[in-house]
Image: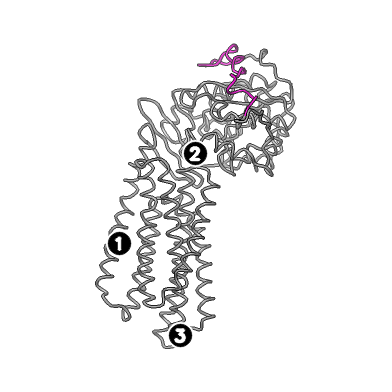
Amino acid sequence: MNEQAIKKSRLIYWASGIVSICGIIFEVLFGALGSYILGDGVKQYTLTISLFLTGMGIGASISEKVMKKLILTFVWIEFMVALIGGFSSFIMFGMTAFAPGGSDALFLYLITFTVGALTGVELPILIRKANEIGVELSRSTARVLFSDYAGGLIGGLLFAFYLRPQMGMVKSAFFVACINLAVAVVVLYLFRSEIKNMALHGTAAGVIGVLLVGGLFFGEEMAFAFEQKLYKDPIIYMEESAYQRIVLTKEQGDTRLYLNGSLQFSSSDEHRYHETLVHPPMAQAESHEDVLVLGGGDGLAAKELLGYSDVEEITLVDLDPAVTHLANTNYHLLQLNEGSLMDERVTVYNKDAFQFLENAEQFYDVIIIDLPDPNNESLNKLYTKEFYSLVRNHLAPGGAAMVQATSPVFATEVYWTISETIASTGLSIENFHVDIPSFGNWGFVMASRELIDVGSLDIKKKTEFLTDELLKSMTVFGKDEDREIVNRDGETVTLEPNTLIDPNLIQKYEQAWQNY
């Protein structure tokens, strides 16, 4: 091979690696989009990965028909990947705001399959071109595939640790699309002697480049306007952390926190939620010296706990450091939590709650479990018998725990399955539910090593909402929210504990909330 041929073959190997990086980033980006906008992360990642790989297979089959103008075909495939992939997140947010329900999911699955198919056409074309240049077929195939697979690893790491947390989903899509376009332009230039009408292809590249650069600099601002329509009130803060999308809204004095689109609290009625979460187990527990809070990174549960003078230490475990940092720095949150996480009695750990309990050696007088609902695999493990067994093992004699357990009205079977799971560890339990206007009717499960007598509980702290008499009424459930669940065939549903081996809660949760 002459020097020019060597240079071209090397470019092909580099191009295959770079487009592979872009392809895997788009693949996981589509999964992240589905998880955030459509919910159920496991389902969305499963569907997007399956559709992307299926598209790649079909694309590879179609590539057999491409025998001529290999470089020009590759260049225009990159043009299409850049346009479709680049505008994918932007259009997805727009459809969520304006299009009929369900069309956003159809759009996501369609672009996933399309980009996968285009990606599947690329590699065989590059291998064929490398062979055409004069590289031995076995060597060209092996090298192109190596570049492709190695690029896949790099792409996944880039998305997880840099693009998503630093650039967000909209800007990341445009940025990666610009790389696809750059590869196409470099290939087009190096193989210009083989291509006619260079001016036409160059103009197309220029137009696409202008669109992508415009999207890179202004797309996120426009998508922000689209996303604003997903929320009732104006957005005052937004952040894409390594774990979730954090949004704060405010309207007429009502501050609301959303994580991945799910409401965490409304300042207008959060006192109802947090008083019910904190004060009953504090009334049940014989001692308050050491308290553990799992979740609660907004600092509102900690604020309620700090009202007890005999609390000596509060250990708060919240996975996302972005949430606890926001609670300590955002003016609106500080107005609500009164700087609770900065109190000298509070120690914050940004760790997984399951792993924290596995490694902890301390016993706690009160354990408050204020975690997001079990809507994905990662959260589901925090609602299993194994997790609640760890809670039991770290609960001091005479201690008490309280678990937020979603709505017994909207998700009846989910609520009572959580209750059954906690009871399966041998702890005594009591069920509560309370009306919270921003949430609806919400459920809690209190647990203790000792028998619980709600009638003897005495709320000793000043509250805005909770009273001893009201607490007793919270244990009464109506017929449509009680444990006696009847299916459509008139049969009583048998509740089984949720476990790591049999995670039955996720599907129940998805079915329960799909209409809300």
Residue at the outermost front position: 489
Residue at the outermost top position: 469
Q: Secondary structure at mark 2?
A: helix
User: Residue 221 in the image: x percent, y percent?
Assistant: 32, 46
Which residue is denoted by mark 1 in the rendering? 209
Q: Secondary structure at mark 1?
A: helix
Dot in front, 1 or 3 = 3
Colour setting: one colour
Q: Horizontal placement of 450 versus 335: left or right?
A: right
Question: 37 or 258, which is in the foreground?
Answer: 37
**Mark 1 burial class by Cα count in 10 Å: few <14, some 14-19, many 20+:** some
Which residue is denoted by mark 2 in the rendering? 323
Q: Secondary structure at mark 3?
A: loop
Mark closest to the chain's N terminus, 1 or 3: 3
Kindly identify the residue that appears in the image at 45 percent across and 48 percent down: 33
Mark closest to the chain's N terminus, 2 or 1: 1
Does the stretch in magenta take in 482? Answer: yes
Kindly identify the residue that appears in the image at 73 percent across and 34 percent down: 393
Report which quarter residue 94 is drawn in: top left
Magenta: main secondary structure equals: loop
Q: Horizontal placement of 497 versus 248: left or right?
A: right
Label 3 – label 2 distance at C-alpha: 56 Å
The residue segment tinted magenta is 459-486
